[in-house]
Amino acid sequence: MTVLVVGSIALDSVETPFGRAENVLGGSAVFFAASASLLTQVQMVGVVGSDYPIDQLDALAERGVDLSGLEHAEGESFRWRGRYRHDLNSAETLETRLGVFSHFRPKIPAAFRNAPFVFLGNIDPRLQLDVLEQVDKPKLVACDTMNFWIESRRSDLLALLERVDLITLNDAEARQLTEEVNLVKAARWIQAHGPKHVIIKKGEHGALMFGPRSVFFTPAFPLETVFDPTGAGDAFAGGFIGYLAHCGTVNDVNMRRAVVYGSAMGSFAVERFSITRFLEIDEQDIAARVREFYQLVSVEQELPA
Ligand code: AMP
């Protein structure tokens, strides 16, 4: 089944303890599409400026990402500059230049409106709401957000929460949004404001999925080399929703498996700058990493009565 993603399409400049990259492909929609397209069909909507190296998206098109919803506007593309110090869990934003995103109004092509899975990648919550006005009753709508929007568009974000089935956000964002220090309380607060499922990502400490009746946890894959954490969150979302779309059915069992796929795809994202790693891997690499996840957490002993 198809996933529609709307989000930022960025040129990122990133500095990590291991090197730096200037003006490389980034943005929530791009990381999501690079990840999800390894599992299912993806339709991408966003805007690029006149300075965008459009041919670099060919690799995604070859993977079957439908780019016909991409808008080309006069002006500068969205740019984000960030830095990670030795704590690779938290990005320090040095600069955000919205460029053509500041006038962007998503137009969902008619052929994309009945996508059964919709991911509202990290952009202005007003635009995320705009997208929901244009789609026909998807099976699952998920969204992501970040500190930038929690600070500047809180009321729009709360209106959005009422209309989504699931939200992914990291631990710091969950605490900022809810003003709860405890993550269980933070998740319950978010659930009380709309989404039945809340996924809180904790970087190298894994991810927690809070559902109406249960909580599920996966660790992060213990990689020896984490090169650049940028995009791990969007790649996680791409793996999670990509897997659900691949299955076609949303139920508890598939959602738990989807968290493992999300974690696997997040672990690939951090191995290189930008989306490079996703262009190197295939289904077998994903299957191998998912198997390693199961080995990481499975216990052969019987549970005590
Ligand atoms: P993450 O998966 O959370 O590491 O997201 C990384 C991506 O978010 C980067 O590629 C940035 O281009 C993008 N990004 C950073 N700030 C914003 C923002 N305010 N709105 C939308 N996207 C952003």
Image (cartoon, helix red, strand yellow):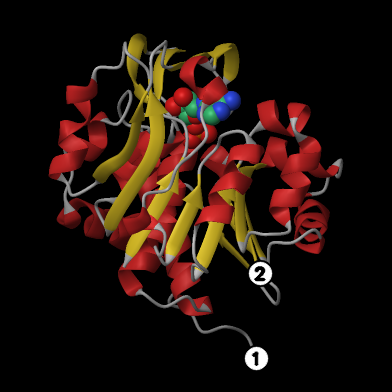
Q: Is residue 270 above or below residue 248?
A: above
Residue 295 in view in this figure: no
Residue found at x 32% / y 62%: 2
Residue 297 in view in this figure: yes
Relative image position of residue 178 (x, y in whole percent): 83, 44
User: Residue under circle 1?
Assistant: 305
Residue found at x 59% / y 45%: 130
Relative placement, left or right, of 34 versus 169 is: left
Relative image position of residue 287 (x, y in whole percent): 24, 60
Instruction: Quote the CA–CA distance across marks 1 and 2.
Output: 25 Å
Tell which of 20 and 26 is nearer to you: 26
User: Residue under circle 2?
Assistant: 211
Number of marks = 2
Residue found at x 27% / y 58%: 39
Q: Is residue 151 above or below residue 212?
A: above
Tell which of 301 and 196 is nearer to you: 196
Residue found at x 54% / y 23%: 103
Circle nearer the N terminus (1, 2): 2
Residue 96, by quadrant, is top right
Relative placement, left or right, of 141 versus 147 is: left
Relative placement, left or right, of 102 versus 248 is: right
Q: Is residue 303 above or below residue 170?
A: below
Say few, some or many: other residues with alpha carbon within 10 Å of mark 1 (under 14 / 14 to 19 / 20 or more). few
Relative image position of residue 13 (x, y in whole percent): 41, 12
Which one is in front in this view, the residue at disc 1 or the one at disc 2?
2
The quadrant the C terminus occupies is bottom right
- Is ligand 1 within 8 Å of the beta carbon of the residue shown at mark 2? no
Which residue of the protein is positioned furthest toward the left in this rendering?
A: 62
Kindly identify the amino acid type of the residue bearing the numbered disc 2: Gly
The quadrant the N terminus occupies is bottom left
